[in-house]
Image: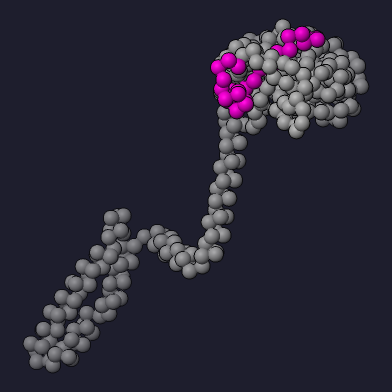
Amino acid sequence: MGWTRFFRRSRWDAERARELEAHLEIETDEFIARGVAPDEARWAAQRKLGNLLRIREEIYEMNTLAFVEAIWQDLRYGARRLRRDRAFTAVALLSLMLGIGANTAIFQLLDVVRLQPLPVREPIQLVEVRPAGTQPRPGNVITRYAQLTNPQWERLRADQRAFSSMLAWAPMRLNLAAGGEIRYAQAIFVSGDFFEMLGVSASRGRLLGTADDQRGCSSRAAVISDAFWQREYGGAPDIVGRPIRLENRAFDIVGVTPAGFYGVEVGRQFDVAVPICAAGALGGDSGLLDDSFIWWLSAMGRLRPGWSVEQATAHLGGAARKVDQYAARKVIQSEGGSFYVLPV
């Protein structure tokens, strides 16, 4: 039986009803012709043909897909109940909306975290660098996902050979207001190679470079995101060269990042990027740059051609022991201070 007959059951039932009624009339006329009274003739014809309603039901069931019919009946019953109880209907619809919304949000997060690569040049080459082991580290952890101290970062960057380039970064909220009510911006401290290593180009002006991330931060350069430029400055075309105050210290806006770049922290966006060398003045702790017990930086590297993650791991393990004996012995306290790398 095809789907066409299933969806035309009502029409078929009407046709069968007319046919059965015609047969009943014919049989009734035959009984009358034999001399049977009209009333008795009709009863005799009905007895001969059988239960006409049952015959129609059997034909109807022959043209029915049981599972589809059951679903359709359930839907009709549910619709009648929902029409009768409007309060229950409202609660049910709200529950469905919340469930669909939550699942959509979870899928979008999964899509961003696992399915879509970072919007940077050749993201498959990027790896995250962090200390090996899970033992607690003595000192202060002051940023999300902090893996390194600045002394560790500087020494590791200078000694490693596994990566063609490396970057470090750290998120931190900075106050935009010169006085009065505090107004925070989502800032990131970045190393001088941050934007160059990621292959990100400025949409206006320039981005931070190695010359900006030198001890003393004489340039006082800052880069803002496209979203922050539109929100705070209305997309003003003369944005390059304008001042911006961070923690009541003046910086010069030297460029704007492209609209599709939000940083390297999945699920979060940044407003302004400043060099790591400015952390001592802006971070509220003068020891950020020199203290081996303040954990606040995260690091990434771009693998050199021919290097695997396993080779980089082995190389960084030796590099960590060589360049940071104190951290290896007192701060990291795991596997001799070695580092491991994971694909981003």
Q: Say if 270 sits above or below 15 in the image.
A: above
Residue 248 horizontal/vertical position (percent):
77, 22
Residue 136 horizontal/vertical position (percent):
86, 30
Q: How is the image coloured?
A: one colour
Residue 279 horizontal/vertical position (percent):
79, 19
User: Which residue: 48% across, 69% down?
Assistant: 84
The stretch in magenta equals 214-239
* Left or right of residue 332: residue 35: left
Q: Which of 17 and 186 is in front in this view?
A: 186
* Left or right of residue 122: residue 250: right
Q: Of all residues shown, which one is farthest toward the top?
A: 211
Residue 228 counted in the magenta span? yes
Q: Nearer the viewer, residue 242 or 198?
A: 242
User: Which residue: 85% across, 11% down?
Assistant: 322
* Left or right of residue 263: residue 22: left
Count of picture labels:
0
